Image: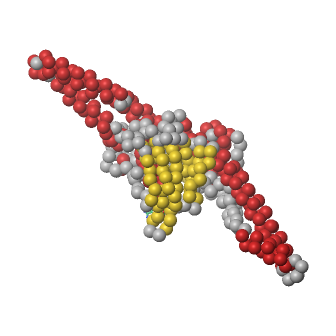
Amino acid sequence: MLLQASGIVKHYGVTPILEGVSLQIGERDRIGLVGVNGAGKSTFLKILAGELDSDQGSVSKPRELRIGYLAQNSGLAPQLTIQEVMNAAFGPLLEQERALGRLEARIADPAEQADAARYEALLAQYADANDRFREAGGFEMNNRIRAVLHGMGFGDFAPQTVVSSLSGGQRTRLALARLLVVQPELLLLDEPTNHLDIDTLTWLEQYLRTYSGAMVIVSHDRYFLDATVSSIVEIERQAATRYTGNYTRFMELKAADFAQKVKLYDQQRKEIQRMEEFIQKNIVRATTTRRAQSRRNALERIERLERPGTLKQASFSFSAERRTGKDVLQVYDASAAPVADISPPVQACRLRGQARRAHRAAWSQRRRQDDPAARAGRSASARGGHDPLGHRRAARLL
Ligand SMILES: Nc1ncnc2c1ncn2[C@@H]1O[C@H](COP(=O)(O)OP(=O)(O)OP(=O)(O)O)[C@@H](O)[C@H]1O
Ligand SMILES: [Mg+2]
């Protein structure tokens, strides 16, 4: 067991957000944390990460557990460079590297060699420090930084590029890169796919799929969850329920659970109706009034089931009132660069009518190739049905 949260209670003012939520995270658990906007997902994740105190309850975890927490819309200090952001992830290792450098300088210093015994001790100290550095992955540090930066689309960026010059999506990617490079035993990711383009999203899916640690991912993207998690925790009405399986399985279980609740509710409603009719008919007749009274007592004792809510469904369509025949976008001879030279310049960009449709089709096809669920032929409308979370990916495709 990596982490255990027990009986977490959190209120903001008088508003209850979490009421006695518990969660156990095992060493290889891959959990998708879902719920409607404002359900308390980010609040719960912050409590798990130790960024926020709960009002009641406890989070137990080994003190040395490496947790990688990505906050929703996490901000990086704008003045830092890419290199500094990535290096910051390796704080203790960098200190070890500097200490090794100092020892190397001393070893090379002829003055240190004058006393043979002292020199021996120095060499032994260096060998020790070197072993510790190697065991902690120090020699792979720069390769790991390079590999993750490359995977996250920063391969062509100068290490001195400052955060303030990056777009919102690029900042999310860099925050993710910093997190992944230290390979935490537990990843807590709050909406990591926000602002990611399709290539980076695909890369992240693959990366997380083969990640050896545990993870809790908050996401509204069901395709991403299907590709990455094996159980779902839903926060609903301040409580958490855990379901085994990916997001698609969770929806099936929810639908089955809902159907069962509706069935039980209907059965009880009919039974109550029958009893009420019986009481009404028989209470005034002397011969049957005792039976009617005992039925009334039974009716009062019945614990009434709550009427099941509705499964959230979203369904919408758009129709064009008239075709305008006008170009939606025309850009000629556009060029843009944060610095003076851009090579090659964007010569001309024109996207309309057929080209626009072709671009969209290419994107959808690309997605189907990457996504087994989409390959299985689910339509955009199926994505919307019974699914409060499904709209974002659909919107991205359109
Ligand atoms: N610091 C705060 N002070 C007061 N209320 C807060 C605070 N942080 C969050 N809330 C409220 O608590 C509720 C839960 O917020 P939280 O951010 O955990 O939701 P969420 O499930 O992550 O939602 P979303 O899907 O929109 O990210 C919301 O109603 C929010 O407005
Ligand atoms: Mg949130």
Is 135 placed above or below 194 here? above
Quadrant assignment, res 141: top left
Left or right of 200, for residue 299: right
Question: What x and y, as percent, mark residue 130?
Answer: 29, 25
Question: What x and y, as percent, mark residue 86?
Answer: 36, 40
Left or right of 2, for residue 35: right
Q: Residue at x 66, y 46 (%)?
A: 249
Q: Nearer the viewer, residue 138 or 24?
A: 24
Q: Is residue 29 visible?
A: yes
Q: Residue at x 59, y 42 (%)?
A: 230
Question: What x and y, as percent, mark residue 176?
Answer: 44, 43
Left or right of 240, for residue 129: left
Q: Nearer the viewer, residue 194 or 156?
A: 194
The tally of labels here is: 0
Point out the residue furthest to the top here.
116
Q: Residue at x 34, y 38 (%)?
A: 90
Question: What x and y, as percent, mark residue 374?
Answer: 66, 43
- Give the colouring mode of the picture: secondary structure
Q: Nearer the viewer, residue 229 or 141?
A: 229
Left or right of 136, for residue 277: right
Q: Is residue 334 visible?
A: no
Q: Residue at x 52, y 49 (%)?
A: 23
